[in-house]
Amino acid sequence: HLTLDYYKDRFLSFGLSTRYSDFGVDTSEFVPDPIISGNKSVNEFNFDIWILYRAKGLFVNLNMANALTPNRSDFGENEPLNRQELNTHIGYNLKVGKKYVTVQPSLNHHLFFADARAETDFNLKVSKDVITWKYWAGISLRTRPDSAFDLLSITPMVGIKYHNLYFSYGYQNFYSTSGLFNQNAHMFSIGFDFLCFVSDCKCTH
């Protein structure tokens, strides 16, 4: 975290995530196909990069996923080599009155470099702090900007946090007719914060 302006709450943060993937396909029970020649086993190392800018309630986050581009096709000539993805997340935390209520509208734009496909999420989250409890509810609308913002899904979400323990639930409703596997989905999240120490650095508050 870098402090750009201590008194105006302007900060710049960076993050890096690495991962290793191992993927295998067992073709022993496949119907014989001349295109498929034996089992496949590939592995890959890649990493993601984050940049986050904050100024008062405003935040702008850029995330480049799969920063490394593989130099070979493991499964065929039609396999896209460029699997990079760019996420742009912009939002604002608005404090409402003195009731410890925060309203957070945000927009997330997801660009897939392989086929120039894009998705845009319009999000709204409302949270309230009550002593050691925190309650929140939100909704996310996923659209396709290259198809006149055709609606892909609507996801309402609710969550609760008590001290370091939190739980959330969301239900994703798909509206896209382009895919055969778009099924509505329940999403659960359970978390626990630990090894969190109070810091004198204002950027971590």
Image: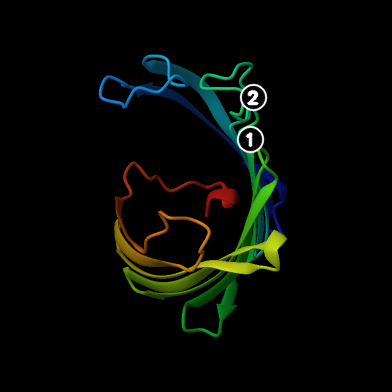
| x then y, percent, for residue 10 | 70, 54
**Badge 2: residue crowd in 10 Å (few <14, some 14–19, many ≥20):** few
| Amino acid carrying mark 2 in the image | Thr
Q: Nearer the viewer, residue 130 or 28?
A: 28
Q: Nearer the viewer, residue 99 or 197?
A: 99
Circle 2 is placed at which residue position?
Answer: 69
| Residue 97 numbered tag | none
What's the residue at 33%, 49% (across, down)? 193
Q: Is residue 102 left or right of residue 6?
A: left
Query: Looking at the picture, how far across and down is residue 186, in whole percent?
Result: 31, 62
Q: Secondary structure at mark 1?
A: loop
The label number, if any, that marks residue 84 in the structure image: 1
Please rate how many residues cluster around mark 1, counting C-alpha atoms within 10 Å: few if below 14, some from 14 to 19, many from 20.
some
Q: Measured from the top left, where is residue 151 in percent x and y?
A: 57, 69
Between disc 1 and disc 2, whose residue precedes?
A: 2
Report whether residue 109 is seen: no
Disc 2 element: loop
Residue 108: percent from left, percent from top = 62, 58
Seen from this angle, which residue lies furthest top? 38
> Quick check: marks 1 and 2 in contact, CB under 8 Å?
yes
Tell me: residue 101, above or below residue 53.
Answer: below
Frontmost residue, 199 versus 140: 140
What's under tag 1, amino acid-wise?
Gln
